[in-house]
Amino acid sequence: MIGPARTLGPGSTPSTREALAALAPWWRVHERYRRRLLLGVVLMTMTALSALGLLAVSGWFITASALTGAALAAGAVAVLDVYTPGSAIRLFAVSRTVSRYLERLYNHDTILRLLASLRGSAFASLVSMDPARLAARRSSDWLNRLTADIDTLDALYLRLAAPPVMALLLIVALLGITLVWLPGATPWLALLLLTGWAWLTLGQARWGLVASRRRVTTLEALRSSLMEALRGHAELEAYAALGHVREQLEAVEARLLADQWRLAVISAVGNALAVLVIGLAWLLLLAMGMLALRDGQLSGPMMVMLPLAAMALGEGMAGLPAAFSQAGATLGAAERLNDIEHAAGVVHGDARLSAGPITVTLEQVSYRYPGALFEAFSNVSLTVEAGEQVAICGASGAGKSTLAALLTGQTSLASRGLQSRLDEEPSGGTEQQGGGTELQGGGIEESSGGPEEKRGEEQSGRVLLNGREVHHYAPLAIADGVGCLTQQVDLFDASLADNLRLGAADAEDAVLWRVLAAVDLADWVASLPQGLATRVGEGGRQVSGGQARRISLARLALTNPGLVLLDEPFSGLDATTAQRVAQGLADWLAGRTVIYLLHEHDLAAPRPGTEAVTRVWWLDR
């Protein structure tokens, strides 16, 4: 799990410690692939060293051949071994091609494996968030982090780690050759190349840090705003607001283009400096080589070989400026992904729910969403016995959906200290404290409270299933033991059968037809040309709201939970259809604990489909 790190604004400049702290969790993920990453660096270095050897030997061989030919033309006796340098040239040429191919193939395979692991980890963190945390940002923002930010992290190895190491090893190799043949030039060459390497990496990264971080943030904002504008185009046009939205998008785009232009300038300056450093190294070796040739300390072919070897530095240094100018984008992506890990803070145990109906107990539960002005509900206490069918009622905003989120483990009572409580054995019950509000059938009975009554906590109380707090259960146990139909029905752009089989992956077609009949959809599906293979469209757009709700009910009926939460299950259905659906689901609901979350319910005159309810609690009375 990624530890906490301070997230800075896109326009601020983080310190070196802050940057390393943000990247540290992702370096640890890279360590899982340490051997593959090291082998990738070896392949990159082999490619660069082969290029250096090819240029150096070629320069030596061409010059030696020319001098030998000139000597022979002058009548002198000269001997030149053409087989050894010729074989070396072929070796370096082939090794450069092969190592380049293997490096690209191997490193990209490694990075794809790494990105798949990172994306799976980020998605797991996203799905473990409670609704409040998910609602804090646009869905397009979360999608951008899951895709674009994860993809940006491939630069951490491919552009920010391996290339500078390879370039440094190439510099060391050139310095080693120079030390052997031209030792007097080695200190000056080392000073030039190491200073240039430092600027092209750390200097470029620091210079482009703010602009590159801000560019990625602005691009995310532009993408999200554009998606929202397209989604709400009809409403914007109806209210004559398209012009205003266009101005907003143009302003964001202008900021994006300004940062892109700044980064282009920074990269161009870096590229020019890289060419300058390589050129100066070439001139330095040429000048000092000519002096050594004059003094008889160096042969002609060796004098040519050293400057040509310096030209191979472009293999390692040419790509550094562009990569490190964009280092802030990688840092920003890491910071945003760290936020996902921090937000997914719900802690679960490993207990299992026993088979059969579940007893539900709430003990003085209060919940307020972070930043909300009012509590979702306060000091709620109730008990639903195993096998009961009850209704919890309240107006919109009374906290019904929050209650469902608590019972399904999607939201936790964080203020109680989840991790410390995992090691405690839950008690069978809790004595009621003074100052609470106990919900009774049909209304609220206020218990006596004194001046020491404690109110105003954001989250407090206990939510128990079968006498054990929800967070003690494994997430899979909650998923299997608690079935929930929420207000929002999620259908995927797939066939009816595929959407239904989310409830039971191995369900036969006959089983699917049976649950469709239970929700009064079998005749409708049978009338469709493609039947169960009919696609429902993105978000279920090809079906009506009532049909989508019944498809979701049918999917729920394929599961075997001990507790069923039904949030306005017959919303969008006429009374006759609701009655038929209730009758079709009666056998499946029998023997389970059922909690209806409704706006209102009258035991004397129940609405169609809710006749089995025996008790009612009100959250807002």
Image (spheres, rainbow, N blue to C red):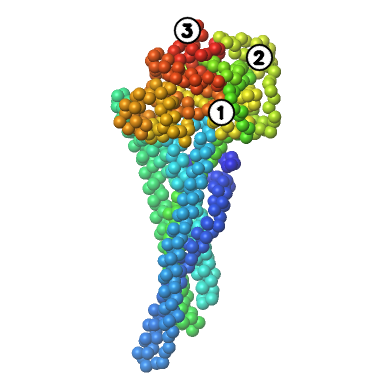
Whether the residues at callouts 3 and 1 have beta carbons within 8 Å, the answer is no
Label 2 environment density (alpha carbons within 10 Å; few <14, some 14–19, many ≥20): some
Q: Quick check: marks 1 and 2 in contact, CB under 8 Å?
A: no
Q: Callout 2, which amino acid? A: Gly
Q: CA distance from mark 3 to mark 2?
A: 34 Å
Question: 231 or 514: nearer the eye?
Answer: 514
Q: Amino acid at mark 3?
A: Ala
Residue that mark 1 sits on:
481
Quarter containing the N terminus? top right
Name the foreground residue: 238 vs 74.
Answer: 238
Mark number displayed over residue 435 = 2
Callout 3 secondary element: loop
Which residue: 53% across, 23% down? Answer: 564
Three-letter amino acid code at the position of disc 1: Gly
Q: CA distance from mark 3 to mark 1?
A: 31 Å
Which circle marks residue 605 in the picture?
Answer: 3
**Of 363 and 188, the residue lying toward us:** 363
Q: Are marks 3 and 2 in contact (CB under 8 Å)?
A: no
User: What's the CA distance linking mark 1 and mark 2?
Assistant: 33 Å
